[in-house]
Image: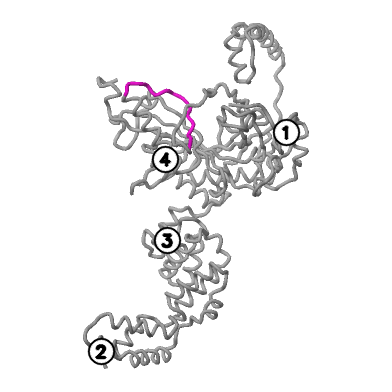
Amino acid sequence: MTAQTLEQRDLAAVIGLEVHVQLETDTKIFCGCSTEATEDEEPNTRTCPTCLGLPGALPVLNEGAVEAAVKIGKALDADIPEETSFHRKNYYYPDLPKNFQITQYDAPICRDGRIEVEIEDERREISIRRAHLEEDPGSLQHAGGSIDTADYTLVNYNRAGTPLMEVVTRPDFRSPKETRRFLAKMEEVLEYLGVFDATRDGSLRVDANISMVPADEVAEDGSIAEETLESANRTEVKNISSHKGAEKALAYEVTRQKNAIKRGRAVEQETRHWDESRGVTVSMRSKEEEKDYRYFREADLPPLRVSGWKEEIPIPELPDARRDRFREEYGLDEESADKLTSTKEVADFYEEVAERFDPDLAATWVADNLLGELNYRDMRITDVTDRLDEFARLVELVDEGEITTKNAEEVVLRRMLDEGEDPDAVIEAEGLGTADDDEVAVAVSEAIDENPDAVEDYHAGEGGALNFLVGQVMGKTGGSADPGDVNRLLRERLED
Amino acid sequence: MSDTADEERAASVTADDVRHVAELARVDLDEGEVDEFAAQFVDILEYFEALDEVPEVDTEDDLANVMRPDEVRDGLSQEEALSNATETEDGYFKGPRVS
């Protein structure tokens, strides 16, 4: 210990995360019950003897969950050990019908991975200690009050047995903001892999470990000595369910711990609960320690030997690689490349359009016009992926000068999305075909003949006069003329 | 572990050990029961010494990678799922308050 006491030194936050993600399989991890919650489904309608923990029922591992885990391991650049196995974690709480949770303990399916995250223009590598498979518990409702004051508990096992992957990082985060960026990046990667759906309720749950250490003990490269970490009391914050929630909960916890230390009080080593609605963390009842869980091998599940699957199971190009390739191959700027790789579906959509047209034109149409209009309507690219041909046709019509860009953007695309019509039908119905040259020439002549005052103003050097005449021509052609052409034609005629 | 070590461990079950295990199991014990069970625990742990007498046997051939395809199978109806429950409410299992 240095001469200075802890309360006088500058403090730095040290944070590690445990991220639980729901794997996108059709069935639960140890039984054939569906994982697909229907809207307003009745409780306890997706269960069987296995996920209800009835005597004699045996778990059988879902191959789909193991494949998803291997894909995640590959994407995290993790080791898949020769042999992995399952354990029972024992604790008594009614969300577990068996009084134990099947999870992995000393032989997780993934070890020692990493994820690169861009934080404030700096690429940081976050180390992944391990990632393992486990089953989700059921859900509880505390009837007639909060958890402490409820009259009784209602239990629904529909969710029990849903496959989860728990990803555990090293304490590599130095600020709450970094955890948010990491979670966004991890979700993006998992969605690319097709093993995760962020729109599913409760698909992401986060526990965070956080402690404060003297800032001058953090090395230049962000590393911290093991003994410094161990001597700092840390809290575990539970019940975080979003990227934003992680940042807010941890920012609260940083302030709380700093204040405690500044006042000369030690931070209590404890589990705290993030109360999202009040924006505070509160101390939870003392939890079991690791030895209390009496982990032991799940004898009903033989070990897994799937290290070879790493070679056999392909994974798609991941977002960082795809972003770099888009910039190189299509010459996109950083912003467009970011937008066009935001999800795998957007990137696939763009590449199909780019194959048919100039990649720049395709980028403008997908990144700016289509994504913008979709966003405005609260729609996603997946709502229109089966209409890619119609969208390509619209770009083709613009590319060939059949309609103006303005009409394509403001009328055709919007009607395509709002009314579900195809572009040719919209053009037909709205009479939007580009005015042919003759029609424009006639309209120009008429505008000049009908507005001698404006012509006079133009020759007197009044800038607004030309705009007025352009407006007249556009009106006569129903907006189907190209304003640039009209402008040019008018000048030619007026200068004659 | 040797027999003597086992005996030492067995003999050292304290009232605190019993209270801790009872808390993990969410069982309420009064002080009389704690003492009674502490004594009984010693006996129970001694029963396990019988395992030391079991001869070693060959383990079964290694079984590995037992999995099922990711295909939905019919499970239980809500009525069937709840049929063993002592108390239910609106399709839920009903239990005491937990915290």
- Nearer to the camera, A121 or A480: A480
Q: Along the polypeptide, which appears first: circle 4 or circle 3?
A: 4
Residue shown at 43% from the left, 68% from the top: A359
Please identify the quadrant where the N terminus of chain A is shown.
top left
Chain under label 3? Answer: A
Kindly identify which numbered label has been placed on residue A326: 3
In terms of image quadrants, where is residue A170?
A: top left
Q: Residues within 10 Å of mark 3 (few under 14, many from 20)?
A: many
Cα–Cα gap, marks 4 and 1: 39 Å
- Residue under disc 4 on the same chain as residue under disc 3: yes
Cα–Cα gap, marks 1 and 3: 57 Å
Of labels 1 and 3, the one closer to you: 1
Q: Amino acid at mark 3?
A: Phe
Q: Residue A467: horizontal and vertical position, in percent?
A: 31, 80
- Residue under disc 4 on the same chain as residue under disc 2: yes
Residue shown at 56% from the left, 67% from the top: A387
Q: Is residue A267 in the magenta section?
A: yes
Cα–Cα gap, marks 4 and 2: 64 Å
- Residue under disc 4 on the same chain as residue under disc 1: no
Chain under label 1? Answer: B
- Nearer to the camera, A461 or B7: A461
Q: Secondary structure at mark 2?
A: helix
Q: Can you say whether A388 is above or below A74 in the image?
A: below
Cα–Cα gap, marks 3 and 2: 53 Å
Q: Secondary structure at mark 3?
A: helix
Q: For mark 2, what is the residue? A: A456
Of labels 1 and 2, the one closer to you: 2
Q: For mark 1, what is the residue? A: B88
